[in-house]
Image (cartoon, rainbow, N blue to C red):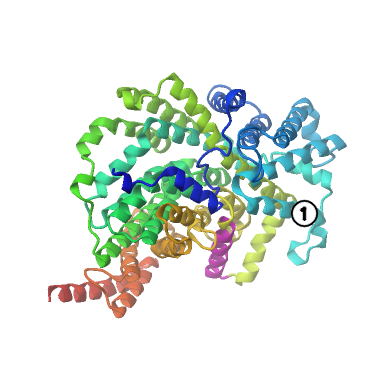
Amino acid sequence: MKDEKVADIKEVEQKLQELHIKDVEVSPGRELKGPLYVAVFMVGLAMSFFHIYVLTIRAIDPWYFRTMHVVFAAVLIFALIPGWKKAPRNRIHYIDYLFILLIVAPTVYIFIEFDEWIYRVGVVPNQWDFFFSLLFVISVVEMTRRTTGLPLAILSGIFILYGHFGNYMPGLFYHKGYAWDRMMTYLFSLDGILSLPILASAHYIFLFVLFGAFIESSGAGKFFVDLARCAAGRFRGGPGKVSIISSAFIGTASGSSVANVVVDGVFNIPMMKHAGFKAHIAGAIEAMNSAGGQIVPPVMGAGAFLMAEILGIPYAKVALAAVIPAALYYFAAYWMIDFYSASAGLWGMKREDIPVFRKIMVEKGYLLVSLVVLGVALMVFMYSPYRSAILAIITLIIVSWIRKETRLGPKSIVETLAKGARGSIEIAATCAAAGIIVGVLTQTGLGMKFAMIIINYSGGSLILALIFTMLIAIILGMGMPTTAAYAISASVLAPALIQLKVPAIAAHLFIFYFACLSALTPPVALAAFAAAAIANAKTWDVGWQSMRFAIAGFIIPFMFVYGPAMVLIGSATEVTIAIITGLIGTMALSGAVQGWLLTRTTWLDRALLLAAALFLIKPGWRTDLIGLGLLVIVFVYQYTKMKK
C-alpha cells in the first residue's frame, strides 16, 4: 500500500491520547529500560505462565487464583501506566511502588490467615481484616482510574458510599447501611471484587487476549485485512465492505471496539478515503463495523464469557444464540454501505490495489487453521473456552513454522507471552471495579430492588422496560468498557426483563448489544472518536453518522426479544422465517436510511421502505406479508423508473 494511503500509527496514538481514549492500550504509558524493563517483562511472563499452569495443569483454590490475577494486573498497571500527567515516563515513581505494596500486602495477609479469614470476611472481621481489605479496594479503584479513566472509578466510589450510607436513602433505595469493616471485607471476597467478572477475566478472557497477541505476532492480523480486501474490495463501495470482514475477524477476539478501530482502521479508513468516501463517513463505517465485532461468535469479546457464567449455561449456547443477530447486524451494514456507495457514485477498488487471493492463501492461508481449531473446539467438541484458547494458541505456533516470515520461535513466544499479559491489564482492572459494584448490589439487595424500580416505572409495559434498559445500558457504556457496562447492567436490569417473561438468554443479549453499541453514541462515543482521530474528521460528525449507519443494530435487540426464534428459541420453521424476514427487513431499513434501493428514492419511497422494514422486523405472519407487500410496491416502482 502506498505511503499516502496508510495512517502513521504514532500520529494516531497521539490523537487518541488527546481525545482521552483509554479503551485500548495503544502503547505502554512508560518506556522502561534496563533492570526495570526486565523486571516488568518478567512479571508479564510470569502472569502468562501462571494462568496457563493453573488452567491447564493444576487448579488451585479460587481465592488464590483470582487474587493473584488481580495482583499481577495491578503490578503491571502501576509499573507501566503513570498516575498523573507529569509522572516520570522512564522510571517507576515511589508512589507507584507504594500502590504495588498496597495490593501485595493484603494478598500475603489473606494467604497467611486464609483458614480463619474465610469465616470472618463480611461477617465478623477484625481490625486487620478491615485494614488490608481497605488497602485492596483502594488499589483496585486506582487501577481502574489509570486504565479506563475517572468514570468507572467514580462510579465505584459512589456505590461504596451507598453501601455505607444507604440508611439515608429514600424509598426503594433504602437499606440499613453497613459498617465500613463489614463492607470492605465483603468487597474483598468472592462476592465482591473476586466475583463473576474477575472469574471471567481470569478463566477465559486472559487466554483469549493471549491468543490475540499471538495472532498479531504471527502477522495473521494483516492477513485478515488482505483476505477481506480480496473478498469484498472489487464490489461497489468495496473498501467499506472490506471493513466489515476485517472488523468481524479481529473484533470477535479483541473484545474492544476501540482496539478494533485502531488495529484495522489504520488500513481501512485511508483506503476508504482514497476510494472517495468522505472522511467522517469513512470513520463512521469503521466505527460501526468495529463495534459489531464484539457480537460476532465464536469469541464475542469478553462479556459473552461472563454471560455464560451468569446464566449457568455452556458458552457454546451463548455463541450459537448470537449467530443470527450478528449476521443481521453485518447484513444491514453491508446494505448501508452498498446503498450509500450507489447514491454517492462510489465503486470498488482498483484491480492493482486488491491482493491476489490465491497468492495470499498460498503464502499465509495456513494461519486460518488456528481459528478453525478454535471454532471446532468451542462449538463442536464443546470444550471449555480456556482449553479451546490453549489449543488455538498451540495450533497457531505450530502452523507459523510453515514460513519463515510468520515463524514464532522461542524468543517470539516468550515476548508474546509477556505482551499478552500486558494486553489483559485493562480488562482485569475493569472486571475488578465491576466486582465492587456487583458486591454492593448483592450486599445491599439493590440488584433485586432495581428490577422492581424498572417494572414500577414502566407500569409493567415490556416496551417501556426495554427502552429504559436500553438507555441505562448505553449511559453506563458511554463511560466504561463493554465488559463493565454489561456486568453492571446484567446485575440490575436483566432480572426485571426476565420477570416480564423475556427469555433469559434474550434478556442478557439485549443488554450486551447495547453495552457494545454505546461505543457509537455521543457524547462519549469511544469507537467513533478513535475512528475520527484516524480519519482526521470531526468527532461529533463521525459519532452521529456511525449511529445512522448502525441504526439496524439498535433495532435488532428488540427483534429477538419479541421474536425469540432469532436466538434459536423455537421450531426450525420459526427460526427460518425469522432469519428470512429479518434479512429482508434490514435491507429495507438500509434503503430507507440511505435513500436508495434500485435507484434514488423519493420521500414516499423511503416512508414505505421504513414501514416495510418495521412490519418485517415485527414477528408474525400477518405483519410479514404486509411488509413484503410494501417492499414489492417500492421495488416495482423503482424498477419501472430505472427502466425509463
What's the magenta region? 461-477
Badge 1 local density, few (<14 within 10 Å), some, or many (20+)? some
Is residue 476 one of those drawn in magenta?
A: yes
Is residue 595 one of those drawn in magenta?
A: no
**Chief SS of the magenta region:** helix
Where 616 sits versus 201, above or below? below
Residue 570 in view in this figure: no
Indicate the secondary structure of the residue bearing disc 1: helix
* Left/right of residue 21 with respect to residue 290 in the rendered view: right
Question: Farthest residue in the top direction?
Answer: 410
Per the image, the residue denoted by label 1 is 161
Residue in the picture at 41% in, 34% down: 216
Front in this rendered view, residue 49 or 81:
81
* Left/right of residue 69 with respect to residue 531 in the rendered view: right
Q: Quadrant of the C terminus?
A: bottom left
Whole-percent x and y of residue 152?
A: 64, 51
The amino acid sitting under disc 1 is Leu
Q: Quadrant of the N terminus?
A: top left
Whole-percent x and y of residue 247?
A: 38, 47
Question: Farthest residue in the left direction?
Answer: 644
Front in this rendered view, residue 439 or 263:
263
Question: Farthest residue in the bottom direction?
Answer: 604
Whole-percent x and y of residue 157?
A: 72, 52
Residue 421 in view in this figure: yes
